[in-house]
Amino acid sequence: MKTQVAIIGAGPSGLLLGQLLHKAGIDNVIVERQTPEYVLGRIRAGVLEQGTVDMLREAGVAERMDAEGLVHEGVELIVDGRRVSIPLKELTGGKTVVVYGQTEVTRDLMDARRAVGAPTVYSAADVQVHDIEGERPYLTYEKDGQVHRIDCDYIAGCDGFHGVSRQSIPAEVLTHYERIYPFGWLGLLSDTPPVNDELIYAHHDRGFVLCSQRSRTRSRYYLQVPLSEKVEDWSDERFWEELKARLPEDVAGRLVTGPSLEKSIAPLRSYVVEPMQYGKLFLVGDAAHIVPPTGAKGLNLAASDVCYLYRILVRVYREGRTDLLAKYSELALRRIWKGERFSWFMTNLLHDFGDDKDAWDRKMQQADREYYLGSHAGLVNIAENYVGLPYEDIE
């Protein structure tokens, strides 16, 4: 099989890149090691930045998002019992976020790809990249007992942190940056109405809380827990009682509880690898960076990677501007590091680090809370990062 761009990974970043390239007349094939059902079964975040929303509209897959997604013009922080409303739209000149689950984004992209007949290979085993330093790179994979080959011009590695793409780059080429946090998030998904119109991020002496939502009838809640906790030790009843204990009484009194649809514990980490390209291989999304979910940046940073790579490839194929390929990593990483900073900042601002912070660090944490939540400039800083920083021009 021959194509122009081979994409490894059929998550939202791979599917979005594939859809945009298809609309631009650039042939592409997506290879995914899991089944479609497995991909759709992943429960992930659902806060979309303005830039991500714009990209989905450009890709022609926004009809259901625009009809069902919840536009949020603000977000609420609760610190030391003080409730602070951050009017995102007012502070950012009209920008908002849209709450629309990543699973739904993936479903919309899958449906769009199926509708245009663009090829996707699921359940592809032993995917490998070859000759990425040469003129004609290619992929191989196994399926139905046979080895298949895809010849291409470029390879986009959208296959996540544990995928083959980053591992295919020589180790001596890469620099890894990482921060591991001493806690995780216990998440519960339920078919219950959200406790609040806007998302709530709350700091409490018992640990951080996030009250999020997927729709007007489906809610997603998170509790900070030690890494030693096991999800099977958390009954629904225990989760709801702990959530109520960490919320102000008036909010806890409005909480509607119900059976969980899904519960899981996710460790928190920050990770970036540089560079994000090697030869004809380009890393996209979680293959190159991980953020703690506190800043709602994971899917959104992946979308900005897609934006840069897509716009560069369009110029390559339409104008022969192969010189722009060398700019991808630099452009993507500038925005990634700002997203990493904001995610680290929000994690540090709102979580209880226990003995992992000394007295000085705890005083700095308190000073940050007082400044950022008590200053107009501080609120603007949070708001403009939360709705998403603008994308750069590729030249």
Image (cartoon, grey):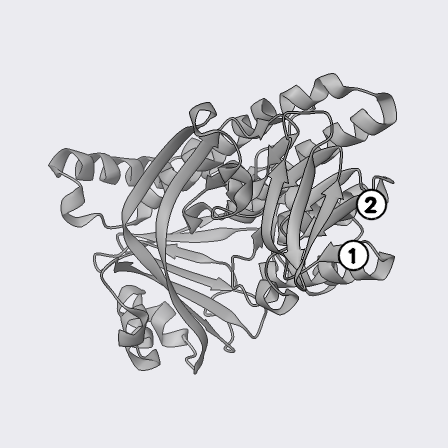
Q: Is residue 101 visible?
A: no
Location of the C terminus (image quadrant): top right
**Closer-to-camera residue (109/145):** 145
Q: To which quarter of the image does residue 315 belong?
A: top right
Is 298 left, or right, of 60 in this rendering?
Answer: left
Q: To which quarter of the image does residue 5 belong?
A: top right
Where does label 1 land, which residue?
Answer: 113
**Closer-to-camera residue (23/39):** 39
When the figure is inspected, residue 54 is found, relative to residue 218, above or below; the finding is above
Labels 2 & 1 near each other (Cβ < 8 A): yes
Q: Residues within 10 Å of mark 2 (few under 14, many from 20)?
A: some
Q: Which mark is on residue 280?
A: none
- Residue at screen point 43% across, 83% down: 259
Q: Amino acid type of disc 1?
A: Arg
Spatial CA span between label 2 and label 1:
9 Å
When the figure is inspected, residue 226 is found, relative to residue 254, above or below; the finding is above
Q: Secondary structure at mark 1?
A: helix
Q: Residues within 10 Å of mark 1 (few under 14, many from 20)?
A: some
Q: Earlier in the sequence, mark 2 or mark 1?
A: 2
Where does label 2 land, which residue?
Answer: 22
Q: To which quarter of the image does residue 216 belong?
A: bottom right
